[in-house]
Image: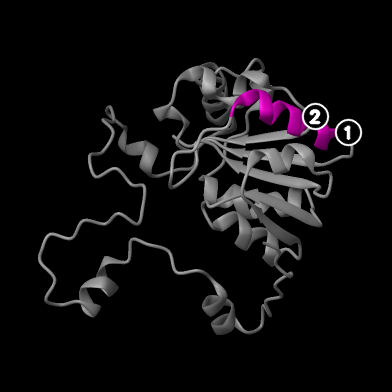
Amino acid sequence: MKSEPVTIDPLDPQRALESLVVHGGRLFDARHAFPKAPEPWIDLSTGINPAPYPVGEVSEASWTRLPEENEIRALEAAAAHTFGARFESSVIAAPGTETLIHLLPRLFPARHVAILGFTYSEYKIAYETAGAVVDIVDTIEELLSSDDFDTIVVVNPNNPCGRLVDPKHLTAIASKLARKGGRLIVDEAFMDLMEDAASFVHRLPNEGAVILRSF
């Protein structure tokens, strides 16, 4: 399924907002639309865990300032160790995956993007907004056999169905893209639910690959 590039006029913010896909989690709007629905609402449109992860004591000072560079480096080192990256220099911290998704087209400009679907829609929005042509591809075999794309996005495990792609297939795709200056983007936001061997992190460094992890 092929799309045409989307052009958004930055001087027309209303049109820009209307062009965005409506995301889930808008319970206020849902309650307004269905006032007689029974309570409580169960929101299955987001992957947010209603049982919060236990957080240790956080100093009051931590809420009043941004982290220092040495603290960010310590975070990146801890992430490299936890996720199994061989080199700390392979890890860069950012304020959320959403920020990185929209930075990727600027960091690695793309003309023709393939996304292994059906999946999280934000990648399609980000690359189309940047002017790329985006194809939604149904199988990993199509990505392994095609040379049409300069950027390929694989959400692994997939959101929302949990589909898991073998790291050896991702290695083959990344190597193929690297030879022509392309990039494989692997989103491992839900990899903590899988066996450690399923992660592509252990195949890094790879010139043709970027992995996004959330914590």
115 lies above or below 72:
below
Q: Which residues are magenta?
A: 166-179
* Residue at image location 69% in from the left, 23% down from the top: 89
Residue at the (43%, 44%) spot, across then down: 161
- Is residue 176 covered in magenta? yes
Q: Position of residue 133 (x, y in %)?
A: 75, 62
Q: Secondary structure at mark 2?
A: helix
- Indicate whether 147 appears above or below 173: below
Give the quadrant of residue 203: top right
Decide: few, some or many residues near mark 1? Use Cα within 10 Å; few <14, some 14-19, many ≥20.
Answer: few
Label 1 vs label 2: CA separation? Answer: 6 Å
Q: In the rendering, at what x and y percent does residue 9 appear?
A: 69, 80
Question: Residue type at mark 2?
Answer: Ser
Q: Main secondary structure of the magenta part?
A: helix
Residue at 33%, 47% in the rendered image:
48
Residue type of the residue flagged with mark 1: Arg
Q: Is 33 situated left or right of 9 in this image?
A: left
Q: Which mark is residue 179?
A: 1
Nearer the observer, 123 or 114:
114
Instruction: Please state which of residues 158 and 16 is positioned toward the viewer in this rendering.
Output: 158
Residue 137: x percent and y percent? 65, 51
| Residue 164 in magenta stretch | no
Q: In what quadrant of the picture does the N terminus appear?
A: bottom right
**Is disc 2 surrounded by few (<14), some (14 to 19) or many (20+) residues within 10 Å?**
some
Specify the color scheme: one colour
Q: Quadrant of the C terminus?
A: top left
Q: Which residue is mark 2?
A: 175
Q: Is residue 149 left or right of residue 54?
A: right
Cβ–Cβ under 8 Å for marks 1 and 2: yes
Give 136 or 179, whichever is nearer the viewer. Answer: 136
